[in-house]
Image (cartoon, rainbow, N blue to C red):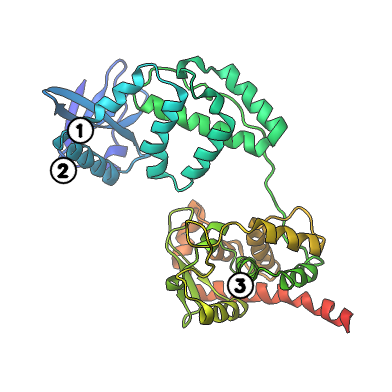
Amino acid sequence: MSSHRLNFTKAALSRAPNAAKGRKDYYYDEREAGLVMAVTPTGTKSFYLYKRIDGRPERLLLGRFPDISVENARKMAAAAKGKIASGNNPQKERRAIRAEMSFGDLFTLYLEKYAKVHKRSWAYDQREVNKFLSHWFKRKISAIDRSEVERLHARIGKENGIYQANRLLERIRSIFNKAIDWGWDGTNPAIGIKKFKEKSRDRFLQPDELPRFFEALANEPNETARDFIMISLLTGARKSNTLAMRWQDISFQAETWRIPDTKNGDAQTIHLPRQAMAILTERKLQSESPWVFPGEGKSGHLADPKKAWARILKEAGIADLRIHDLRRTLGSYQAATGANGYIIGKSLGHRSQQSTAIYARLNLDPVRDSVNKATEAMFGYMQPAREDRK
């Protein structure tokens, strides 16, 4: 075992070599007392907080590098020391998981200590686990083995579809991974089980469907749902962001909508074409709510308008179309009117390592031009329908 002291930076820790066989090397941060990175012979690098708790030295695992950045490791170490100073012992929670506990207790711990803290989609975890895994709640976690998870995955795939089965498998794997992180000595029963092969979805509104879709949408009696669906098509924004659209995030002068927090964690500015501005201007004149699409639920804004969507598709005679496909529709018509992949990605808020640098150099003007061309192309398909009725 060898130890080193240095100022933790990503570059410095990345250069740290593998430890010798049968040993571990430890690197101590000069800025945050007690923060340590351990390196194994295989090159695994993990952050720990070394601290004396209740009179004895303790080692608290924070996470792996580079999954956790140096900055976040320092914040986590400082937060843990704050808990210790206030009389809480983080290690007690971790030792508790080592004893035999039920899957129900583990899932409760997972929700409270991880999902609700780190995942915006934690409610989906709660709903799906309660729906499909409640028969495990009184079972000891060590009694759930891989063969049982394999059988469950196969059954859910047959009865509820491969996408549902794969998402449930991911949740099981995540829950047991957290148990291991928290000190459980067992084996994750979901490891090694192959997911069903999924086909990437490529559905979007075809040119012959657009006139019928626009006509059915115009006839929809639920005005809020109707406007929400049209704005979804015109902006290409994700459904969750559009449902939660707020007036304070819309600039009528710049004709833009700033989404402060998207799925990938970044803020996004969306150009609003003239058709969208007309809808928003009319709604603003009548609005007394902070939400563009107010609703009666706990959130205060519109919930998923499933009934309105079903009525529109039935009247238009369109099958196998989801609200999320409206996002793909905008991108498809951008491509059809000459936009390149970087422009489309910028307008839809996609993020990838290859395009991030290019996105940083783009302003909104080419995106604005691309979205305008795409929306004009879509609305252009309304003309034949009008001429047919003359």
Q: Answer left or right for 254 relative to 198.
A: left
Q: Residue at x 46, y 19 (%)?
A: 141
Marks 2 and 1: CB-CB under 8 Å? no
- Sequence-first disc among 2 and 1: 2
Apparent side of residue 33 relative to residue 382 in the rendered image (left or right): left
Name the residue type under label 1: Asn
Determine if residue 8 is in view.
no
Residue kind at label 2, given as amino acid type: Arg
Task: Report the Cα–Cα distance between label 2 and label 3.
Answer: 48 Å
Q: Secondary structure at mark 2?
A: loop
Residue that badge 1 annotates: 88
Looking at the image, the residue that sits furthest to the front is 296
Determine which residue is flagged by label 3: 371
Above or below residue 39? Residue 99 is above
Numbered tag placed on residue 31 in the rendering: 2
* Mark-to-mark CA distance, 3 and 1: 54 Å
Q: Is residue 219 above or below residue 98?
A: below
Numbered circles on residues, count:
3
Q: Quadrant of the N terminus?
A: top left
Q: In the image, residue 73 lies at what x, y percent?
A: 27, 41
Q: Is residue 154 left or right of residue 78?
A: right
Query: Residue 22 sits in which quadrant?
Result: top left
Q: If the image is split into quadrants, where does the C terminus sit?
A: bottom right
Mark 1: secondary structure: loop
